[in-house]
Amino acid sequence: MNASIRPEQVDENTEADGDLAAVSEVEAGIREFVRNDIAYLRRPAVAAETAPLDANAEATVNNVNSLIQRVAGTSLAEIEKLISELESLRDLLHAEGQRVQREISGYAQLSQAAMKSTRMIADNVNQWKRAADGLRNS
């Protein structure tokens, strides 16, 4: 069987691989942070002012924070994009609703004008018919 890969599929696969890599990176960072945090808790208690912060733990915390911000930033950007698209669609629907209302109003006015014209024509035809009947009878 011949299977061809479309460019859209390649783009989707690349994007999915990038997302998976970012998720794996975040998970690895969180695991490392938890390991360091647990190791810190297992150490004997030392007074807070005498225990300097472990530079490795601080770097890990900063790394995890930056990873979370990158992943969250991407999600937030997508959410913002969706919100702006929905607002654009709302504006479009509002404008189309107003256009349809104008079209219906124009149709109603045209319909009323047609009814008036039809009544006038019918009244004139009746007057001509009576006049013609009056001439025949005389």
Image (cartoon, rainbow, N blue to C red):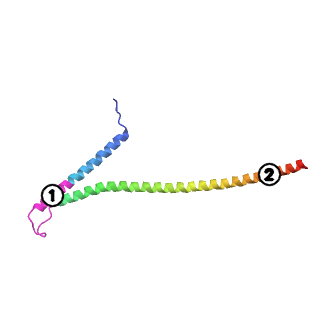
Q: Residues within 10 Å of mark 2 (few under 14, many from 20)?
A: few
Q: Which residues are magenta?
A: 30-55
Residue at the spot of label 1 = 36
Amino acid under disc 2: Asn
**Foreground disc of the pair 2, 1:** 2
**Residue 44 percent coordinates (x, y):** 8, 64
Question: Are the two marked residues, 2 and 1, in contact with CB atoms closer than 8 angstroms?
Answer: no
Q: Is residue 70 above or below residue 52?
A: above
Question: In the displayed image of the protein, which residue is found farthest to the right?
Answer: 138
Which label's residue is closer to the chain start, 2 or 1?
Answer: 1
Q: Tell me residue 64's x, y (percent).
A: 23, 57
Spatial CA span between label 2 and label 1: 102 Å
Residue 106 lies in magenta, yes or no? no
Residue in front for this viewpoint, 71 or 111: 111
Q: Residue extending furthest top?
A: 1
Does residue 35 show up magenta in the picture? yes
Q: Looking at the image, which residue sits at the far left?
A: 44
Examine the rendered structure and indicate whether residue 55 appears above or below residue 128. below
Residue 126's tag is 2
Q: Is residue 92 left or right of residue 24?
A: right
